[in-house]
């Protein structure tokens, strides 16, 4: 360990011995268990870097730690250029502009809403394309059907860190003369056919948000082998400044701060601990959920490098409880499992009003947004906690009928009824 302490706060003794909390038993966890508590890394190293920042009095504006972080990220994902930013959303906006997107861009609806907003923010229409139910990523066969004369690009999302159909999308983009970007916010530290995610398409976009595999408090990056694109992105990141008083293009302020870079470097150095903790948790979930009717744990390619930063289950309500019912059972136990990504971008404004019919054309995304549930993992939990959570799920699904009756008499969770309103 390099100080990326694994803290497993499970109250494991309660597993299996008492009534579920929704039925009046005690909560399995005294404290709330969150899906994405941050991975920290070596605290003393972080403090040392922070002291250096204060000593140098260089807090931002392309400082030495930002440059070091860009170098380290670029080497790790094996690309020629890395432009670090204040967050992943700004990195997306800049990559979209630097790649020349306009008009329409084809994108998955099954993603964090920032992917769609980054397009819309710049007056580009996101055209939602259905996903492949096996991968949860853009279905390349359907992408081609959505290309019009207004289409300028495709934005794939490597959801859960599982790569998009990169080869098919690359061939399609080349054949149809489109730009190809990837939102790789989930996929830092993952590989595709042995090559790290980061080096595909015209550019890929990373997020180092606090909840991500490697974090810089808030942060992001554009990674690419295209030197011209990187240069445009670098200018845009800093108001178009090419030097003192020399503004060459329209830009924004998307600069990463030195404090963020200090955290990013510290977090990056501890990645082997994060990989190991996530693998242990994932394997514990796999063992704990084996044979539970109606629960399918999403799988990762064993042959690829993978952060396993997301532990996601698909809940089949015909077997016992629906995803939302199971979520209520878990929340009653203080397990704050999350509905990533419910209800889908196409069901959020402004897209919901603009594309009222979208749901009908996105059957797979619709089905998945009703079934997916993300479970707690990362270095803040460990296999003992995972065993308790898995046991709760096993017991809930085994007792579905009785629980469903009970749930009818208890108040729904905030948002349970609202998001699908009107359809
Ligand atoms: C798929 C995806 N894209 C984009 C973002 C935006 O990144 P950031 O939070 O760093 O702005 C996130 C999450 O945070 C995300 O999960």
Image (tube, rainbow, N blue to C red):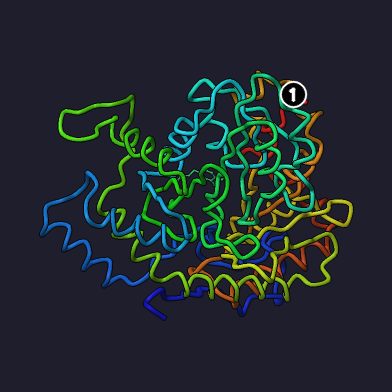
Residue plotted at (43% across, 40% down): 91
Residue on which disc 1 sits:
422
Q: Residues within 10 Å of mark 1 (few under 14, many from 20)?
A: few
Residue plotted at (71% across, 22% down): 148
Which quarter of the picture shows residue 3? Answer: bottom left
Percent position of residue 52, x then y: 16, 62
Q: Is residue 58 above or below residue 118?
A: below
Q: Quadrant of the C terminus?
A: top right
Percent position of residue 400, x then y: 83, 58
Residue plotted at (62% across, 32% down): 178
Which sits in the foreground, 94 or 275? 94
Q: Is residue 80 above or below residue 42?
A: above
Residue plotted at (16% across, 28% down): 245
Which sits in the foreground, 189 or 348? 189
Q: Quadrant of the N terminus?
A: bottom left
Which sits in the foreground, 41 or 400? 41
């Amino acid at each position: 360990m390099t100080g990326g302490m694994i803290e497993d706060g499970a109250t494991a003794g309660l597993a299996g011995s008492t009534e579920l909390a929704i039925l009046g038993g005690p909560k399995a966890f005294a404290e709330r268990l969150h899906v994405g508590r941050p991975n920290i890394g070596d605290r003393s190293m972080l403090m040392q870097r922070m002291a250096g920042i204060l000593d140098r009095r260089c807090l931002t504006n392309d400082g030495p730690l930002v440059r070091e972080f860009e170098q380290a990220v670029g080497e790790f994902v094996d690309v020629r250029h890395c432009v670090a930013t204040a967050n992943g959303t700004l990195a997306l906006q800049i990559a979209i502009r630097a790649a020349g997107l306009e008009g329409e861009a084809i994108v998955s609806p099954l993603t964090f809403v920032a992917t769609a907003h980054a397009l819309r923010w710049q007056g580009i229409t996101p055209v939602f394309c259905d996903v492949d139910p096996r991968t949860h990523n853009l279905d390349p066969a359907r992408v081609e059907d959505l290309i019009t004369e207004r289409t300028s690009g495709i934005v794939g999302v490597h959801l859960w860190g599982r790569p998009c159909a990169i080869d098919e999308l690359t061939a399609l983009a080349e054949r149809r003369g489109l730009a190809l970007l990837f939102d790789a916010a989930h996929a830092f530290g993952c590989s595709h056919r042995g090559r790290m995610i980061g080096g595909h398409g015209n550019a890929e976009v990373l997020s180092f948000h606090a909840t991500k595999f490697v974090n810089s408090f808030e942060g992001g990056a554009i990674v690419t082998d295209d030197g011209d694109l990187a240069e445009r992105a670098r200018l845009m990141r800093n108001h178009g400044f090419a030097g003192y008083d020399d503004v060459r293009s329209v830009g924004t302020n998307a600069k990463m701060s030195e404090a963020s870079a200090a955290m990013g470097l510290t977090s990056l150095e501890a990645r082997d601990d994060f990989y190991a903790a996530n693998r242990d948790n994932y394997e514990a979930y796999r063992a704990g959920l084996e044979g539970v009717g109606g629960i399918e744990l999403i799988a990762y390619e064993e042959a690829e490098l993978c952060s396993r930063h997301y532990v996601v289950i698909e809940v089949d309500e015909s077997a016992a409880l629906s995803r939302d019912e199971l979520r209520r059972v878990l929340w009653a136990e203080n397990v704050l499992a999350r509905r990533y990504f419910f209800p889908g971008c196409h069901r959020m404004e402004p897209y919901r009003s603009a594309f009222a019919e979208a749901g009908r054309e996105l059957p797979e995304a619709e089905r998945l947004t009703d079934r997916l549930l993300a479970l707690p993992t990362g270095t803040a939990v460990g296999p003992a906690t995972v065993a308790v959570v898995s046991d709760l799920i096993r017991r809930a699904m085994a007792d579905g009928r009785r629980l469903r009756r009970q749930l009818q008499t208890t108040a729904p969770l905030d948002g349970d009824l609202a998001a699908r309103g009107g359809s």
